[in-house]
Image: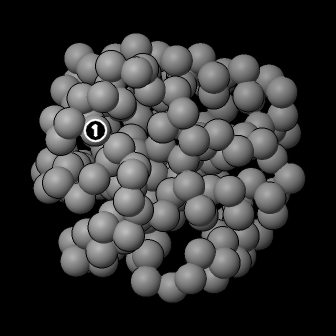
Amino acid sequence: MSRLFIVMGVSGSGKTTVGRLLAQALRLPFYDADDFHSDANIEKMRGGTPLTDGDRGKWLATLAAGLGAWEVAGGAVLACSALREQYRTVLQAGASTPISWVVLEGARELLAARLSARPGHYMGVGLLESQLATLESPAYGLHLSIGPPPEELVRHILAQLQENPTSFQAAR
């Protein structure tokens, strides 16, 4: 059975790091949603301007199509902010089976410190407030604090998968 996982949260939450480690542990391909942004979106964020729902439309459609293809190929792990429920609905619509959601959460101060430590990345600390304001935390999924090391978070995810493999999914 193919499995699709989305590791979500605001910028600086560790989505890419945790997602890569999870993909390695599950022997699934890893994709980073940031790699699918248009040049215009990247330049907008690099300039400190938050994306609008309109800016995210094509990006989300591309990711949804990718999820459908990755599902057919056997599964994948995607790191994606997926900040609003409507975005998660678009992503889920690309797959025929329920997506397993891992929600990374952390204190504003820790997130800001992590973003400040990433010089040259287009998603700067100046956009953190807009991401936190946009975030609609889902009632479903596995919610994890970003305080522990990424390897510990992945061990916890794997243990939860063993215990209850469908517990990360949204009700359909």
Residue that protrudes farthest toward the front in the picture: 120
Q: Which residue is mark 1?
A: 46
From the viewer's perspective, is 52 left or right of 1? left
**Residue shown at 40%/14% (left/top)?**
58
Q: Residues within 10 Å of mark 1 (few under 14, many from 20)?
A: some
**Picture layout, residue 107 above or below residue 120:** below
Three-letter amino acid code at the position of disc 1? Arg
Q: Position of residue 102 (x, y in %)?
A: 52, 58
| Residue 69, placed above or below residue 76 | above
- Image side of residue 82 versus residue 129, left or right: right
Residue 160 visible within the image: no
Identify the residue at horizontal 84%, vertical 34% (top origin): 74
For the point 23% across and 24% down, the residue is: 53
Q: Is residue 61 above or below residue 138?
A: above
Q: Secondary structure at mark 1?
A: helix
Q: Nearer the viewer, residue 5 or 172?
A: 5
Residue 47 occupies quadrant: top left
Q: Looking at this view, is 36 or 116 the one in front?
A: 116
Q: Which one is in front, 11 or 39?
A: 39
Total marks in image: 1
